[in-house]
Amino acid sequence: MSVRTGFSSLGDVNLIETESLEKRYGARVTALSDLTVTIEPGIVGLIGANGAGKSTLIKLALGLLEPTGGTIRVLGLDPGSDGATIRARVGYMPEHDCLPPDLSAAEFVTHLGRVSGLPRAAARERASETLRHVGLYEERYRQIGGYSTGMKQRVKLAQALVHDPELLLLDEPTNGLDPEGRRAMLELVHRIGTEFGISVVVCSHLLGEIERICTSLVAIEGGRLLRSASLSSMTRHSDLLMVEVDEGDEQLASRLTSVGLSVRREQRLLMVRLAGDETFDAIRDAVAECDLSLHRLERHRHQVADLFRAEPTEVNDVRTG
Ligand SMILES: Nc1ncnc2c1ncn2[C@@H]1O[C@H](COP(=O)(O)OP(=O)(O)OP(=O)(O)O)[C@@H](O)[C@H]1O
């Protein structure tokens, strides 16, 4: 596997770009609707509940399905006319099992290397190499039928990697795994992205699980784009200050409200809208005037999960009780 630095091998080319993309199945099911999104190189989490349209988007990207409206480009190419080129440059790990139980992992991955156009010896060599990367080197001559779910997921990942792709499309790679298996699989995906500089689009319905390994997230809901942003922009400071006092938080909230600040209570915390540096002074003054002891006064950071809620929580309502 060639080692690349960062995610630079693609230059300025976007991984996936869609414009008003639509996919209907028959007259009744609209899996994707008016989806416009640009996915840049990196480790990208494609988040959405079951049925949100993630697998459909991946299959459109691979040219396995055709859009019923709009456009999609993958690595700058059109899957409709350049599907074969895209599939040569992209590795795909499908959601469901598709593994022949009677073959060994080495035979299976070598075979797919051959299908991708590698000569026999090179395919064998690359199969061993990728199986080593996914942690199956010792077990590679055993029949896949006897593998655990976690091992089968790793074979699926190895076959996606065998032709040294620039982009990996992983559809729910943690499916069927226990918590430890999920953690190990995500760590492996992260390592492939960072050590080999391969861009990854990884589908999941579990935001909490995937956000740790991603550089950006794209959320879809009911076939429409909910949100798309880099992790760093999502976790930046919000315009709220978190204030915690030992006791007397009600008294403090009233005081802050009376001097014109917007205050909301969240359990033991007062969330105060930051209007400028003077907000810090106003809080310190109010704490001193109420003769309270201040435990915490700091900028609130967005939690990724908060930003994926359809409606961000507004703090205009002043509730002190
Ligand atoms: N071949 C098909 N024929 C008809 N409807 C389909 C077909 N494939 C998917 N759908 C429907 O399209 C919608 C989106 O499905 P899709 O598989 O893309 O979602 P997903 O986000 O990948 O969910 P999951 O993780 O459950 O696969 C769902 O309502 C699904 O039932």
Image: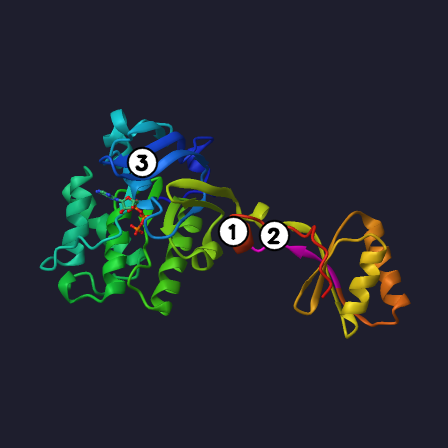
First reached walking from the N terminus: tag 3 or tag 1: 3
**Residue with the most extreme bottom position:** 247
Q: Residues within 10 Å of mark 2 (few under 14, many from 20)?
A: few
**What residue lies at 40% left-to-right and 34% top-to-bottom?**
35
Which residue carries the number 2 mark?
Answer: 313
Classified by dominant secondary structure, the portion drawn in magenta counts as strand
Asked if residue 62 can be seen in this view, the reply is no
**What residue lies at 80% left-to-right and 47% top-to-bottom?**
276
User: For the residues marked 3 and 2, what is the alpha-carbon distance in whole angstroms?
Assistant: 34 Å
First reached walking from the N terminus: tag 3 or tag 2: 3
| Image-based side of 169 in relation to 312, left or right | left
Which residue carries the number 3 mark?
Answer: 61
Q: Establish if 61 lies above or below 47.
A: above
User: For the residues marked 2 and 1, what is the alpha-carbon distance in whole angstroms?
Assistant: 9 Å
The answer to whether the residue labelled 2 contacts the one labelled 1, judged by CB atoms less than 8 Å apart, is yes
Which residue carries the number 1 mark?
Answer: 309
- What colouring method underlies this structural image? rainbow
Indicate the amino acid at tag 3. Ala
The answer to if 299 sits in the magenta stretch is: yes
User: For the residues marked 3 and 1, what is the alpha-carbon distance in whole angstroms?
Assistant: 27 Å
Q: Establish if 123 lies above or below 150.
A: above
Q: Residues within 10 Å of mark 3 (few under 14, many from 20)?
A: many
Indicate the amino acid at tag 1. Arg
Q: Residues within 10 Å of mark 1 (few under 14, many from 20)?
A: few
| Image-based side of 264 in relation to 155, left or right | right
Quadrant of the rendered image containing residue 244:
bottom right
**Residue with the most extreme top position:** 81
| Relative image position of residue 58 (x, y in whole percent) | 31, 41
Q: Secondary structure at mark 1?
A: loop
Q: Closer to the camera, 253 or 189? A: 253
Question: Which region shows up in magenta?
Answer: 297-303
Indicate the amino acid at tag 2. Thr
